[in-house]
Image (cartoon, grey):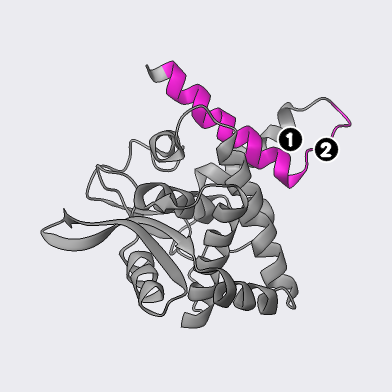
């Protein structure tokens, strides 16, 4: 379902995702890894009873990339809220963009996060992002490689250059459905937590990758 939201909520979500990467010792985080996590945060949001902040993405040969997120990330660098490391530029679709690894600038960003924690919805988002980031650290391969095995991204009905619409105008979120399906596979009487589902889904990506090699 398409959701209209204020610009500041996107900015806060970006800061909270960087905070989760920092908590999981993933920072400074390279661009490709950050966008892979952003994509998984979108498709797996229903597992945490969250809304996807972007229900569509262009299927690129190089993997998930959100131009809007990258522009906002670059803007936050300019505002002094985010630090960029190993700066370079790469050509993407005939345009140059900033490349590097990103981390939060400590105090100013922390003040924003502390303010956000006063609100229940933001606390839930922060917990979701942290569980997702920590789940990615338990994998043998980098998440920017395993994301190609995500069942929504890997769906053969979309090809490179197509738009994957999983919750913008239609409901076709195979990733969330797969994560929630683990409940049916668990022993009778055992109810999986949301964190269990995230971790099991991450391991599913790894198993799919191993099977395809």
In the image, 17 versus 198, the foreground residue is 17
Image coordinates for residue 6, horizontal then vertical, percent: 50, 83
> Is-magenta flag for residue 37?
no
Image coordinates for residue 155, horizontal then vertical, percent: 38, 38
Q: Which residue is mark 2?
A: 191
Image position of 58 (left or right of 30):
left
Badge 2 marks a residue whose secondary structure is loop
Looking at this view, name the residue that lies furthest to the right: 189
Query: Can residue 6 be seen at all in this image of the molecule?
Result: no
Going from the N terminus, do you reach mark 2 or mark 1 first? 1
**Badge 2 vs badge 1, beta-carbon distance below 8 Å:** yes
Residue 80, picture quadrant: bottom left
Image position of 150 (left or right of 122):
left
In the image, residue 2 sits, relative to residue 208, either above or below, namely below
Q: Residue at x 46, y 39 (%)?
A: 143
What residue range appears in magenta?
A: 188-211
Q: Which residue is mark 1?
A: 183
Image coordinates for residue 138, horizontal then vertical, percent: 60, 33
Image position of 169 (left or right of 48):
left
């Amino acid at each position: 379902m398409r959701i209209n939201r204020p610009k500041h909520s996107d900015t806060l979500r970006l800061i909270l995702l960087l905070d989760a990467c920092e908590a999981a010792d993933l920072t400074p985080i390279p661009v490709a890894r950050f966008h892979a996590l952003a994509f998984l945060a979108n498709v797996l949001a229903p597992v945490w009873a969250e809304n996807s902040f972007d229900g569509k993405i262009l299927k690129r040969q190089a993997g998930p990339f959100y131009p809007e997120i990258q522009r906002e990330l670059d803007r936050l660098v300019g505002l002094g809220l985010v630090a960029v490391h190993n700066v370079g530029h790469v050509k993407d679709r005939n345009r140059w963009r900033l490349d590097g690894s990103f981390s939060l600038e400590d105090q100013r960003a922390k003040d924003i996060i502390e303010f956000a924690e006063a609100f229940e919805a933001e606390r839930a988002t922060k917990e979701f992002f942290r569980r997702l980031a920590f789940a990615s650290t338990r994998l043998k391969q980098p998440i920017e490689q395993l994301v190609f095995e995500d069942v929504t991204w890997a769906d053969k009905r979309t090809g490179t250059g197509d738009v994957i619409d999983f919750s913008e105008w239609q409901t076709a979120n195979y990733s969330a459905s797969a994560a929630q399906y683990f409940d049916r596979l668990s022993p009778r009487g055992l109810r999986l937590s949301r964190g269990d589902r995230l971790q099991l889904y991450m391991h599913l990506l790894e198993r799919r990758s191993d099977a395809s090699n």
